Image: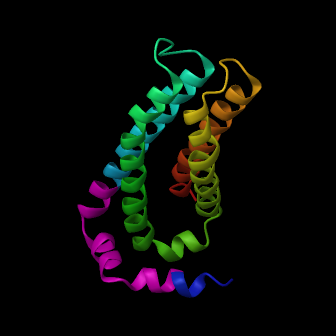
Amino acid sequence: MPFRPFFQWCDTLAIANAVRNSRFIFPIVESIHILALAVLLGTVIVFGARLLGLGLKQRPVDDVYRSLSGMRDCALLTLIVTGFLLFCSEAMKCYDSPPFWAKMIALFAAVLFQYTVVKWAGRKAPARGSVRAIATATLSLLLWFSVGAAGRAIGFY
């Protein structure tokens, strides 16, 4: 597979060795990673609920989207940085892990969907209860929860 040299390189990085060989760094980074995932999922749930008309009905959709954007983006950036550190410490294990590849595919799809369709919904405010609003909220939640579930499965493979 064409990614093997990249995975081998990541496995040999100094930061990978530091995370892998430290008794405390890996659990601290993983804890930050999980907290960032909780924040990200929280923003996705709140916005999805607003799109579905299940919460914050008194606030316009675009206002809710704008209010959550900074927190969501910060959480996503934290997830990517901490995820890279965790990945590097176990790069070759990840290479042979189907849950890792499932997570990467889900992550790519979730980020792409978030910054295209969900962003559009946050600005254009589809009618509450419309097929477009329901589909956007449901697919967004499904994609992000898939990222979390696949990430959790990595530890069991």
Residue reaching furthest to the top? 58
As drawn, 30 above or below 142: below
Q: Quadrant of the C terminus?
A: bottom right
Residue found farthest to the right: 131
- The single residue placed furthest to the front in the displayed view is 124
Q: Residue at x 41, y 48 (%)?
A: 73
- The residue shown at (57%, 43%) is 144
Classify residue 130 as left or right of residue 13: right
* Residue located at (52% from left, 49% from top): 152
Q: Main secondary structure of the magenta part?
A: helix
Is the residue 137 above or below the residue 98 in the image? above
Task: Confirm whether the magenta stretch covers residue 8.
Answer: yes
Q: Quadrant of the N terminus?
A: bottom right
Figure disc tally: 0
Position of 61 relative to 79 (above/below):
above
Which residue appears at 59% of the width and 84% of the height? 4
Instruction: Give 51 or 37, whichever is nearer the viewer.
Output: 51
Q: Position of residue 82 (x, y in %)?
A: 37, 60
Give the residues in magenta.
7-29
Q: Is 40 covered by the magenta stretch?
A: no
Q: Quadrant of residue 42?
A: top left
Q: Quadrant of residue 35?
A: top left
Q: Nearer the viewer, residue 154 or 135?
A: 135
The picture places residue 65, in percent across and down from the top left corner, at 48, 33
Rendered view: 12 above or below 141: below
- Residue 3 percent coordinates (x, y): 61, 81
37 vs 94, left or right, is left
Q: How is the image coloured?
A: rainbow
Q: Report x, y in % for residue 46.
A: 48, 27
